[in-house]
Amino acid sequence: MHERTNRNLRFGIVTDIHCNPGSGSGNQTEAGLERCIERWTQEGAEFVIQLGDLISREGPEAEKDLIAVRDMLARFPGKVHNVAGNHCLAVSPRRYREIMGLDSLYYTFAQRGTRFIVLDGMDVSVVNEPQTEADPHLLEYYRNVKQAHFYCGAIGTRQLTWLVRELDLALKNEEPVIILSHLPLLEETSDEIHGLLWNHQEVTDILCRYPNIRACLSGHYHSAAFAERWGIAFIVLPAFRNGDQRDEQCCLAAELSGHNIMISLTTGTTLFDLDQA
């Protein structure tokens, strides 16, 4: 059985930092993240979720930029849980895992009774090696689908099997679940330019079967968006890079309390306040 506690769970969120020192914005990014870390620490955040697209540049600069922004976030005194975005994989998936200290780009962790499940939306994509015999066929299929942007991707068969196993276990253990995905999973929460997970319908067909899933948090689409389906809150969070360097408008803080989920800017403005009782 999962751990029960009356204490609220607080954590920080940041997405789509797009660190690009070559553009002259590196100092602004560092200063903005320092303000985020200060507020998260003051407010008692137990960990931070980074929802992808840490960098912007490709080529030989990508690895250097990734290390730089990783080290900026490492100043937070707690754990930073990283979700890989499409821009992050300007370095190879293998090298990204090495730099970020990850064994896999999809994984799960728990914090005081809530299960967080991290998805790898670039599992089947033009930047990744096939993991199963079915994956090349899936890639070929979506490369011929007009709405499937080349810079997005799909969740492969091995990861889908893993996802069902983890959701079954969380349901058995009576754990509420939050899904973390860089790519949005509903058409209503993205636009034509940004796109979304290629096999989003297949994934949401799985998610809708589990009454203990409370929310899915995503990035990628730089404007905030929200939709609710099957009792699940699908929340796309605003990009850090959209923020004004004079304040923390795109540094986010979340608080879970019972059936309530509140996500606010670290300036105090509430973006989402959801009572799922």
Image (tube, helix red, strand yellow):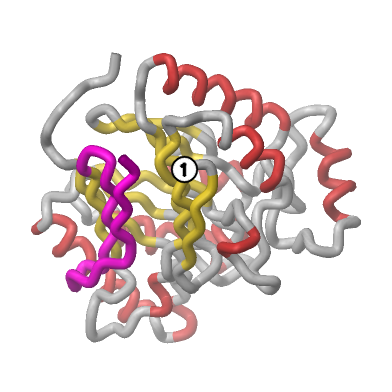
Residue 119: percent from the left, percent from the top?
54, 41
Residue pointed to by mark 1: 231
The N terminus lies in quadrant: top left
Residue 47: percent from the left, percent from the top?
25, 45
Indicate whether 138 appears above or below 267: above
Using the rendered image of the protein, determine whether residue 64 is visible from the camera's viewpoint: no
The residue located at (55%, 58%) in the rendering is 88
Indicate whether 230 appears above or below 238: above
Q: Which residues are magenta?
A: 257-277
- Name the foreground residue: 94 vs 210: 210
Task: Give the amino acid type for the residue marked by disc 1 in the picture.
Answer: Gly
Q: Is residue 267 magenta?
A: yes
Judged by its main secondary structure, the magenta piece is strand
- Name the foreground residue: 85 vs 256: 256
Q: Is residue 93 magenta?
A: no
* 247 on left or right of 153: left
Indicate whether 175 appears above or below 216: above
